[in-house]
Amino acid sequence: MAEHEAKAISTRTKDALAAAKARGKRLGGDRGNLPAVAKEGAKASVAARIAKANNRTSDLLPIIGELKASGAVSLRQIATGLNAGIRTARGGAWSAVQVQRVIERNL
């Protein structure tokens, strides 16, 4: 019974594709040049992530400046100050290395 149904489905599908082709419908897809498209997508992704990081840095630098003015001199102290109310981009806690990278991004 299942073989009969599979044969019927196959026949209907082949007939429908032949009819579409007869009407001038283009079958299949144009995949284009996938490696070139992938490279362009990767470049756009990198540019978007860099822009997002730069925007985040420009938002954080005044806060880091305030923390330095209030007496936080080490990167670890600045990280502790940021942890008091600001989360990292991924929602985690700040570390001294992350603070250093934010500061260096502005240079």
Image (cartoon, rainbow, N blue to C red):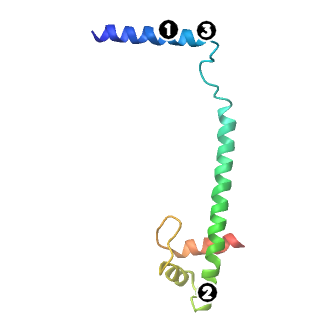
Query: What mark, if any, has residue 15 been given in the picture?
Result: 1
Local crowd size for mark 3, using a 10 Å CA cut-off: few (<14), some (14–19), many (≥20): few
Looking at numbered disc 3 in the image, what kind of residue is underneath it?
Ala
Q: Residue at x 60, y 81 (%)?
A: 63
**In the rendered structure, which disc, 1 or 3, sits on the residue that comes first in sequence?**
1
Considering the numbered disc 1 on the image, is that residue within a helix, a strand or a loop? helix
**Disc 1 versus disc 2: nearer the observer:** 1
Q: Single out the residue that lies furthest toward the left.
A: 1
Residue 38 placed where, x, y %?
Answer: 64, 40
Q: Judging from the image, what secondary structure is the residue with disc 3 in?
A: helix
Name the residue at 51% across, 76% down: 86
Q: x%, y% of residue 49?
A: 63, 57
Disc ID at residue 22:
3
* Mark 2 nearby-residue class (10 Å; few <14, some 14–19, many ≥20): few
Whether residues under marks 1 and 2 lie with C-beta atoms below 8 angstroms apart, the answer is no
Residue at image location 58% in from the left, 75% down from the top: 99
Q: CA distance from mark 1 to mark 2?
A: 73 Å
| Picture quadrant of residue 12 | top left
**What number is the disc on residue 66?**
2
Mark 1 residue type: Asp
